Amino acid sequence: MKNYEEIYNSFVEWIDNMLEKNDMPEDTKAFNFNLYEEDDNIYSVQLIASDRFDPDDDEWACYEVWSSEEDLFFVDTSDEDDKSRETFQKFVTDMISGYIAQNDILKKFPAGIGFVDGEIDILYNNEEI
């Protein structure tokens, strides 16, 4: 993705803001990054905390105990050659992986990612460690 470093730095700032300025409920069991396809080659990311986790059942992410709500992270893909949902999801997955490698806060809980009208991919499952 063009301007990866600039987008990544903005993404890190967004996640830090979500995690540091909001108290996560004590019953948080997992995080999910909800992906949305907006208009005109724009995608967005929403962070939610769930009070359950089941790697075999995507419904766990429907049980939100906290959400970034309308405070979404937007990415404009109009300058990209490949504007597909799959490419965007891989891009966000790579950014999250980079974030997890440098920050312990997400390592406390399993994390998933997926478009809200699709399946969830497990990014990190600390239950397997």
Image (tube, rainbow, N blue to C red):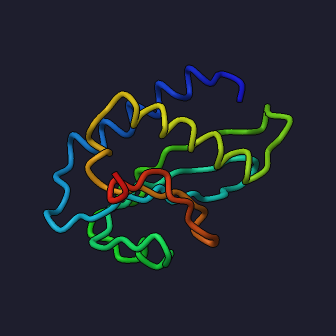
Residue lying at the far front of the rendered structure: 129
Relative to 121, 25 lies left or right: left
Residue lying at the far right of the rendered structure: 81
Relative to 125, 34 lies left or right: right
Residue 99: x and y in percent read 42, 33
Q: Residue at x 23, y 64 (%)?
A: 28
Q: Quadrant of residue 102?
A: top left
* Up-down relation of residue 126 to residue 4 (above or below): below
Q: Residue at x 46, y 70 (%)?
A: 55
Residue 90: x and y in percent read 65, 44
Residue 118: x and y in percent read 64, 70
Relative to 1, 74 lies left or right: left
Residue 114: x and y in percent read 57, 61
Q: Quadrant of residue 62?
A: bottom left
Front position in the image: 40 or 16: 16
* Up-down relation of residue 75 to residue 126 (above or below): above
* Up-down relation of residue 108 to residue 112 (above or below): above
Number of numbered discs on residues: 0
Q: Residue at x 64, y 49 (%)?
A: 89
State which quarter of the image contains the N terminus.
top right
Q: Residue at x 80, y 34 (%)?
A: 80
Residue lying at the far left of the rendered structure: 26
Front position in the image: 102 or 11: 102
Q: Quadrant of residue 54?
A: bottom left
